[in-house]
Image (spheres, rainbow, N blue to C red):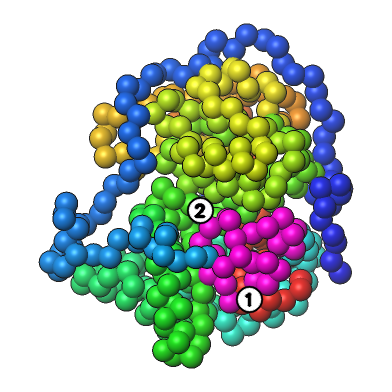
Amino acid sequence: MTATLTDSQPQLFGGAVEREPIAQEPLEDLAPRTEPAHDSSLEQVDHGSDAAGHNENGYVEIDPGEFLASYSPPAIAGDFRGKHIVTVEQFARDDLKVLFEAAATLKKRIRSGDRGVVEIATGQVLALLFFESSTRTDMSFQAAMLRLGGKVVGASNGIQFSSVYKGEDLPDTVRAAGCYADVIALRHPKVGASYLAARYLDQLAEKIGRRSVVVSAGDGVGEHPTQALLDLFTILESRGRVDGLAIAMVGDLKHGRTVHSLAKLLATYGARGTQVNFVSPPSLQMPTPIVQQLTNAGIGVQQTHDLGEILGSSDVIYWTRVQEERFSDPHEYEQVKHGFIMTPKVMERARSDAILMHPLPRKHEMGGPADHELLDADPRSVYFQQMENGMLVRMALLAKLLKGVHI
Ligand code: NCD
């Protein structure tokens, strides 16, 4: 049995909580603690090539960034089967409705011990290509495939012991995985890596006569589409709707791919009457094209470095880690790393019906272990729900991409 998800059906997701009046207390202590001097453009740390782009083999490596322009991701447009997933912009509101209904149904079916779930992807294989560290995304993709009855492969001792170690390039590694698997989850430090993979997998399909698809598990500082899907699902589950909400995204908005994708997804979802407030140190602001995308979609946007301005009126507070690994200058990281720290005291200023989200992992931006304990016990914290939902949404996505099935 399936349920229909609409914004007017909060009961499917447990119901929206009554709204409380906006807190009016002064919030001076919530202002950023440091003012970084420098606002460089979106840059990324390059791994393993010199200034001219020569890799250790002495040839000029393909720049995955070029594929952002040359590869056009297919719109889902009601049919998920065989499509690569590289950006949230592929999903229209109706596609999200279908996907989230499937995820909500899977949640019920798993909880009721429905054994039919393991037949959904029987005989299918997921390959994991993770060129960056991961806990949640990696394990939730694996768990998703295994719970659907599929199998998972990866280089036995990790990608660093694959032929990448011998100097193999990304197109070849991706096509090797494509020869063995039906779907590949790819995480890579370079923007556009999943676009490159999509292009080469299309070529491979012509060669071998069988199609394997890539799902981005995070492209450097670019996008993290499946995280945004689970984030939006969690907002709908917790608050019953996204239309009309005030959503605050806080922290490293420049390098945070989760917030890039979530912001874009709100635009493509066509959120109505939604206000998105970006709170960051001036040097870590949301990239202008994404801000523009929201504005063009009719979503209200405010950019500020003063959390106090918006905390008390936020329905959704999405906290993020300062992405230390993306800074080429460690001093710059030191200057901004204490900008925004969420603690139980800060959370006191939030509405009683707000939700606190975090993609995790968390470091000092959520205080210390004692703060974690208290924040975790706060019913407004939904980051554990996000984690479980990540598996469910990835299950729904894998099922739809591989089989196009109605769940
Ligand atoms: C995020 C990521 O990898 O971008 N983690 C995740 O996938 N849940 C966020 C982060 O690393 O800060």
Question: Which residue occupies 63% across, 22% down?
Answer: 310
Between 166 and 63, which is closer to the camera in this rendering?
Answer: 63
**Residue linked to disc 2:** 224
Which amino acid type corresponds to the residue marked 2 in the rendered image? His
- Mark with earlier residue (2, 1): 1
Callout 1 crowding tier (Cα within 10 Å): few <14, some 14–19, many ≥20 = some
Give percent across and percent down for residue 270: 70, 47
Question: Which residue occupies 44% across, 50% down?
Answer: 222
Q: Secondary structure at mark 2?
A: loop
Between 269 and 228, which is closer to the camera in this rendering?
Answer: 269
The image quarter in which residue 191 lies? bottom left
Q: Is residue 393 left or right of residue 151?
A: right
Question: Which residue occupies 35% across, 60% down?
Answer: 66
The image quarter in which residue 283 lies? top left
Quadrant where the image shows the N terminus = bottom right
Q: Is mark 2 within 8 Å of ligand 1?
A: yes
Residue 117 visible in the snapshot:
yes
- The vertical placement of 401 against 237, above or below, is below
Callout 2 crowding tier (Cα within 10 Å): few <14, some 14–19, many ≥20 = many
Give the total number of marks visible in the rendering: 2
Residue furthest to the left in view is: 58
Which amino acid type corresponds to the residue marked 1 in the rendered image? Arg
Q: Secondary structure at mark 1?
A: loop
Q: Is residue 28 left or right of residue 102?
A: left
In three-dimensional space, the C-alpha distance between marks 2 and 1, rounded to whole angstroms, equals 20 Å
Give percent across and percent down for residue 154: 41, 72
Residue 399 visible in the snapshot:
no
**Residue linked to disc 1:** 81
Question: Which residue occupies 46% across, 84% down?
Answer: 205
- The vertical placement of 39 against 236, above or below, is above
| Residue 271 within the segment the image draws in magenta | no
**Segment tinted magenta in the rendering:** 74-100
